[in-house]
Amino acid sequence: MHAGREGPLLPILHAVQAEFACVDEAAEKAIAKALNLTRAEVHGVVSFYHDFRAEPDPRPTVQICRAEACQARGVEALMPGAEAAAGDRVRLEAVYCLGLCSAGPAARVGDTLHARLDAETLATVIEQA
Amino acid sequence: MSITVRISDDALARACGADELATAFERAGASVERVSSWGMHWLEPLVEIDGIGWGPGTPDRVAEIMAGGAEDLCIGPIAQHPFIAGQQRLTFARAGRTRPLSIDDYAATGGWSGLERARRIGPQAIIEEVTQSGLRGRGGAGFPAGTKWRTVADAPGARKYVVCNADEGDSGTFADRMLIEGDPFQLIEGMAIAALAVGADRGFVYLRSEYPDAIRKLGAALELAAQLIAPFDIELRVGAGAYVCGEETSLLNSLEGKRGEVRAKPPLPAIEGLFGCPTLVNNVLTLAAVPHIVSEGGAELYAALGTGRSRGTMPIQLAGNIRHGGLYETAFGITLRELVCDIGGGTASGQAVKAVQVGGPLGAYIHPDQFDLPFDYEAYAGADALIGHGGVVVFDDTADMGEMARFAFEFCAAESCGKCTPCRIGAVRGAEVIERIRRGERAPGPIELAPQMHNTVKTARGLREQIALLEDLCEVMRDGSLCALGGFTPYPVLSALKHWPQDFAIRALEPSDEL
Ligand SMILES: Cc1cc2nc3c(=O)[nH]c(=O)nc-3n(C[C@H](O)[C@H](O)[C@H](O)COP(=O)(O)O)c2cc1C
Ligand code: SF4
Ligand code: FES
């Protein structure tokens, strides 16, 4: 599917990450072989980008924007409550900007975005993740 | 006949409940059209019936709105709202008015006429008009678009590429996202015109992964428009969460499937870019301005707006702690006071404005005393500030500017591509120095005391010395970094230090240490 593309590595890594929730050593080896690269080259790319993970994480992930505009709208004060709501069950991840900067604090779960969050609505988002 | 209700399907409107609201209107018997966003974000989800607006709408108010009531939410005719009427919308002329993926709506509002004319007048004339319009790159650096197009057109090479930079990583910016989600065909048309001008037959859009709605919509729009732009062909590529990949050479490496490390320039991408071929890299807003410029008389109209060497309009993004946030496209020259205090209505929290960061994470923090600064590339550069991609982030008086300066270093450290030392190491050390200043620490740390560390200072540092160290470090980063990530991080840091020194040294000031 990616064979005819120019510079196919990133689309391949995205597809693997989406399918297996990680790009592990075995996947790196297989990709390296298919693209005639060394595993080190593939690993160098995988480890450069925040979106790819070396190991799967069974927990649901909630991404919370921690960039300047959301800081200006008070996201940092929500973090202790968010961490309490997440506990060990949910993985909280920092992102730097979701493009909702006039309506932060903002969060993303899968492809669903949430804006104008306060302590209560953020806790609900995390509990329902 | 049932009432037609227009509600945006922009990601911000959806994140504020637009889908639930649309369903509620459908249940109540209305027919709902999903359109692009007007850009008045504090009113999203905005409901439009026969040109009249209500916002923000919630499902429990549906019946009232349909009956023409809900006066507390009603803003009257949307197009006459001061926030809209005060703008000069060229790039965002369709915002709020069309269905993003309707190719009929696009054609009915002048779509494709720029491309048709471009095909008639040919590459030379296109480049002349783009040059004449005074359009400069909207991605950050403000490089004259016409000059870049000419360089790519003249570069020898059988294969050339057009690459659209849609990595929009700056906090406080969302104009690329809104353009792609709201008017994707305009970007596609702009890219097709650019391809014609420089002689490219393949194009890429590099779109950040943090924008799921934009990815979906642009993918759909590219399929719908494929025949209209053929033989030119555009492929959508999704980024992978690295801020530095917005830097054009890092972006090209990423497209090639490599680590997103910055390349040394020269060679310029215009001469040796993607896969070593001449490549035109432009921001979404730069390319989306082109269909208007290349339409009949468009270049002159564009050049007639603005001030100094900043011609045309800038889609400014009002963000952060601001009452009326959203997208405000206007001619260059507008002051921050107008933007923040008048149009933006001050802070959302109602507290006083303390600082405004313009131009993303690498832009300076601007003090209210400087609010007469006109929006103009040169004026900002003269004030050690940056227009960048046009993001304006407002902070109220609860903001801790020492913390924002530390965060600037932390962000740089997290996102550094690692290629050059001032940025890779300086960012980490910078955050440490600020922490030390703020903690009021004087004594050298264990690492500095180690015998192997020949050139570290072994005695306690006064506040003044710590600050000198910070300023030194900033100078090294500014002068020694390969790209603007390391090179411009000193701007937010030093501006915060200059205007709000009390936020750095609260617990560290000593009588002997006046700043
Ligand atoms: C760290 C860094 C991040 C950047 N991020 C972006 C970005 O997200 N979008 C963008 O268009 N330009 C970005 N730029 C600027 C690009 O390098 C380049 O100047 C721009 O894409 C050229 O297009 P333009 O002339 O149309 O502005 C960034 C630059 C640096 C140094
Ligand atoms: S300044 Fe930072 S991001 Fe830019 S090339 Fe150097 S290490 Fe990479
Ligand atoms: S800064 Fe949080 S969404 Fe942009």
Image: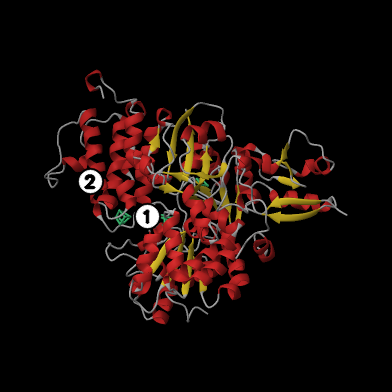
Circle 1 residues within 10 Å: few <14, some 14–19, many ≥20: some
- The quarter holding residue A19 reads bottom right
Q: Where is residue B320 in the image (x, y as percent from the top left)?
A: 51, 39
Instruction: Report the mark closest to the observer, 1 or 2.
Output: 1
SS assignment at label 1: loop
- Tag 1–tag 2 contact (CB < 8 Å): no
Q: Tell me: B39 left or right of B204.
A: right
* Disc 1 residue type (three-letter): Phe
- x 15%, y 37%: residue: B457
Residue on which the image places disc 1: B143
* Disc 2 residue type (three-letter): Val
Q: Report in which chain the residue with disc 1 lies.
A: B
Q: Position of residue B235 (x, y in %)?
A: 51, 71
* Residue nearer the viewer, A3 or B123: B123
Dot 1 or dot 2, earlier in sequence:
1
SS assignment at label 2: helix
User: Which quadrant would the C terminus of chain B be assigned to in this image?
Assistant: top left
Colour mode of the rendering = secondary structure
Q: Return the mark for residue A90.
A: none
Q: Where is residue B234 in the image (x, y as percent from the top left)?
A: 51, 71
Q: Return the mark for residue B476.
A: 2
